[in-house]
Image (spheres, rainbow, N blue to C red):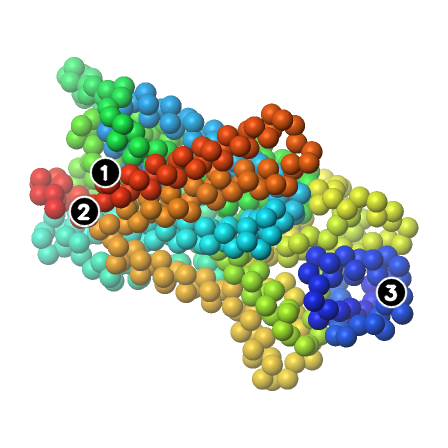
Amino acid sequence: MNIELVMVDSQNGKSLDESNFEINERLKNGYKGEYRDSIESPIGIVVVPLKESSIWVQMLIGFITVIKATIGTGILFAPYSIVNTGYSISLALLLFYWFLNIICTLILLECADRANATYSGIASHAMGKVGRIVADVSLIFTQISFCSVFATFVTKAIQNVIAGIYNCNPSYIDYGTALITFLQLLVYIPLSCPGRIQSLGPAMVIANISLFVGVIIVFVYSALELSKNMANNTIYNIPSYTDLRSVAGFIGTAAFLWVSGPVVLSYYVSIAEQNTRRMFKWVYLGAISFVFVLTLTFTYVSAYGFGEKTFSTITLNLPISPGSITGQIFFALSVLLSFPLMTFPMKEIFTNYIETIYRKYTRKKIVEFILPAEQERQLNVQRTSKINTPIVSSQRNSPFTDRSSGSIVSRLGSKVLLRQPSGSISFTVENLSPKEGISYHIVKAAPSIVTIIISILCCLLGYFLINSLGNFVNLVGGLFCVPISIILPALFHLTMFRKEMKITTLIMDIILIICGVVTAVIVIWYTFVSWSVSNESICRLNSGQIK
């Protein structure tokens, strides 16, 4: 089958999905001249293959991505919360919100199969423009708050390392807050610019290795402390339950600890075939189960190891020694390399808006992409994707009877096809003047420019809110994080599948929405009643000088 350059409408006011559907129809019908004559402004079509990769490599990257998206700084705050709340009620809440987040992530992936889109596209498909705006705003604020925490955590960790190296010399306590915070941009900016989430794979491998080394170091110190207490028969007696206010505080920790839906979704929709997507769901379940076991083991051993002496961040309980300093370095490196992964969902959102605006106002010839014939034979795709996927050409005798977004059948064997990068502009423009060429290249670079601005903003927030960032994160978490991880996925699923779902599924979606609303209210209430400012460091706590 030969693909020729053809012309279609780019200024007819129709949605991108409608325009892509018409292109497929024209490919199917042999480019009828009467349709071409009615066009006002042209689009070019060129053959661009999808990227092929080993399926096992992509599943490994997916496994690593899920782990890194889930395990953040929250695991270091959990032991303190367990001691204050009680071991049994803490375990029940951790298990409940872990299960809740798994269900919400899986129904979010089911919505992605129906809408064939990222988080914003799913929101638009389910609830129109209003839903898309709500989802985008929630996602942006949530990721910005998390990234700000990351920047602050790295700053605090490096300051503790410097103070430990200089034996807690007062001149080196809280050393160079601004310098350390903004030097992190040298890592964040280059790692945040690639348009494909798979490009972060090597950084995620290093981040996970660093995370596990840091966890092992803290775990060893905690286990040694626990074994010493057991030998002296002085093991701490953590109560089963303390008080209602502490439980309210732990709900926020338990709810945020497992949040990874937006990042998991970004990886999921980057895969072109449905068979591989189904495999990735099992990879996700395996990864999140591994995270659950690791988190419970780490947090409970640490909580029982230090008991009532557990500080807000478990790393502050470590002695000032080469081992603890090494642990702080590895934790800082892990969080440092995780920052770009957390910004990727935001980059997808801004890329989509930039592309939509440019398509609407440009008068030049836009060049779209279609698959080559050999990849068309590998994939049987009956519907054009709403995200940055090349338009798939159709054989003339293709029946075109099924247009569901999930009708993708892989014949690749050990290979997997990846969609065009969702974090970069997916088209080119022909016949530009020098001045127009400059503006076009600015548009192409705009997603990366926006990501750079976001990185700077997160570092600024981390710097100015360094002593009260936890309060800010809880507030944003209650207002935005809980909705995007629990409430909105259930609401999307209820809206998109309401005509075909069973009564049990309907009840499940309603229960999820209620759980999300109750959680958000509790987290917001607790944030205001417990608002505080603190400046903890490993040197102050070890000397008993807590400010």
Q: Earlier in the sequence, mark 1 or mark 2?
A: 1
Which of the two labelled residues, at mark 2 and mark 3, occupies the earlier sequence position?
Answer: 3
Residue annotated with mark 1: 312
Q: Secondary structure at mark 3?
A: loop
Residue type, mark 3 in image: Tyr
Name the spot of residue 414 as percent of width and height, x first. 68, 40
Q: Is residue 223 above or below residue 463?
A: above
Q: Nearer the viewer, mark 1 or mark 2?
A: 2
Kindly check if marks 2 and 3 are in contact, taking CB atoms under 8 A apart as contact: no
- Three-letter residue code for mark 2: Ser
How far across and down, in percent of the image, does residue 539 sit?
Answer: 13, 45
- Taking the spot 24% from the left edge, 20% from the top edge, the residue there is 239
Callout 1 secondary element = loop
Spatial CA distance of label 1 from label 2 is: 10 Å
Q: Which residue is mark 2?
A: 534
Compared with 58, 192 (above or below) is below
Q: Amino acid at mark 1?
A: Ser
* Mark nearer the N terminus (3 vs 1): 3
Q: Please report contact status of discs 3 and 1: CB closer than 8 Å, yes or no.
A: no
Relative placement, left or right, of 328 versus 393 is left
